[in-house]
Amino acid sequence: MAGNVQKQIALETVVCLVVDDDKFSRTFVKTALYQIGIKNVKEVGSAEEAREILSAAKVDVILLDQQMPNTNGLDFVRELKSSQNAGKSIPIIMITVDTKEKTVLDAKKLGIHEYLVKPISPLALKKRICSALGIKQERV
């Protein structure tokens, strides 16, 4: 059990970066985050903007869309993992409409912690964020 250490982190302190080119999707995810107690949310519409945020601010978890113009989610993760910046070890949760087996397998290979298919529920999101961050959830 030594390797399964649960961190004591309050969701209120979590800084979340939402990367999605669709404004409606970002608003939806942000609303879901607020509902589960995560109020510190940064949102961007592209991988380029995400890079800027990651170089300038502390982020605990990245919620990432797969299908975006210029750089898709998987390419962004490849780039992040191979870079020397701080974003390299941040847990990533893919939130996408892409259910293709190859995309899901590629995401796993890249070390993406969780994979959610849109539309998402706040409860499912909370479960995945807690899992990615190693936060023990209270049983209801």
Image: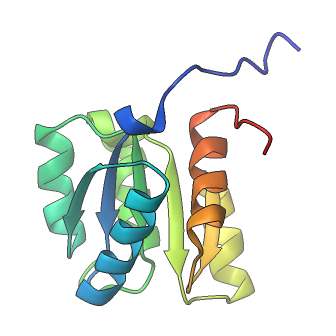
Q: Is residue 52 above or below residue 56?
A: below
The answer to which image quadrant residue 57 occupies is top left
Q: Quadrant of the N terminus?
A: top right
Image position, residue 95 (x, y; %)? 51, 73
Q: Is residue 132 left or right of residue 6?
A: left
Q: Nearer the viewer, residue 62 or 105?
A: 62
The mark tally for this picture is 0
On the image, the x and y values in percent for residue 99 come to 67, 88
**Residue 84 in sight in this render:** no
Nearest to the observer: residue 139 or residue 49: 139
- Residue at x 24% of width, y 34% of height: 58
Residue 120: percent from left, percent from top: 57, 78
Q: Is residue 106 above or below residue 2?
A: below
Vertical placement of 27 versus 137: above or below? below
Residue at image coords 56%, 49%: 129
**Can I make out residue 63 in this image?**
yes
Vertically, is 51 above or below 71? above
Tell me if 84 is positioned left or right of 34 in this view: left
Q: In the figure, is residue 104 to the left or right of 49?
A: right
Most extreme residue toward the top is: 2
What is the x, y in percent for residue 136? 70, 31
- Give me the residue at 57% from left, 20% from top: 8
